[in-house]
Amino acid sequence: MFEAYAGAVAALGYVAVLMLVQLVVADVVGIRQRHVPGSPVEANHNSVLFRVGRTVGNTNESIAIFICALLFCFYAAGSPTYTSYCAWGFAVFRTLYAVCYYANLQTLRSVSFALALLSLVGLVGVGWAG
């Protein structure tokens, strides 16, 4: 069954790598800034430590929706082509989101977040159309 969705499964694997990279970046930044694990980070977008932490947090907030929407497409027999397009859209826009957050490019970060969100809506739509 999953052979038809190989592109979407590859996007899922890519997102897993992206999450791992975000986690490593956050850990390295925390170590370099001598942040004590478990202590609060000041909510300040001028702080790279805050931005890398929010990148991880925001990805964690959206990943369950991505996985659920993918499973919905798989089991509802949604179009494999459109499922892959939407899954890769999510992956690419989440990558752009992370880069923009790291670089503190607020407007582009918001645009990439919105496009990733639209990709999730698209996945749900593909599932419903299945």
Image (cartoon, helix red, strand yellow):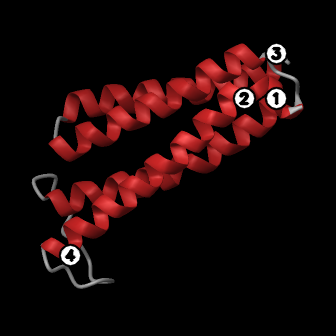
Tell me what residue is drawn at x 38 percent, y 36 percent: 95
Residue 76's spot in the image, x, y percent?
Answer: 88, 28
CB atoms of marks 3 and 1 within 8 Å = no
Label 3 crowd (10 A; few <14 / some 14-19 / many >=20): few
Q: Which residue is mark 1?
A: 3
- The kind of residue on which mark 3 rests is Ala
**Left or right: 33 as drawn, with respect to 4:** left
Q: Secondary structure at mark 1?
A: helix
User: Mark 4, mark 2: which one is toward the viewer?
Assistant: 2
Q: Which mark sits nearer the N-terminus, 1 or 4?
A: 1
CB atoms of marks 2 and 1 within 8 Å = yes
Which mark is on residue 31? Answer: 4
Residue 14's spot in the image, x, y percent?
Answer: 53, 40
Q: Please say if 84 is above or below 28.
A: above
Q: Which residue is mark 2?
A: 6
Q: Which mark sits nearer the N-terminus, 2 or 3?
A: 2
Q: Which residue is mark 3?
A: 129
Q: CA distance from mark 2 to mark 3?
A: 19 Å
Q: Secondary structure at mark 3?
A: helix
Q: Secondary structure at mark 4?
A: helix
User: Mark 2, mark 3: which one is toward the viewer?
Assistant: 2
**Left or right: 50 as drawn, with respect to 16:** left
Q: CA distance from mark 3 to mark 1?
A: 20 Å
Tell me what residue is drawn at x 82 percent, y 15 percent: 129
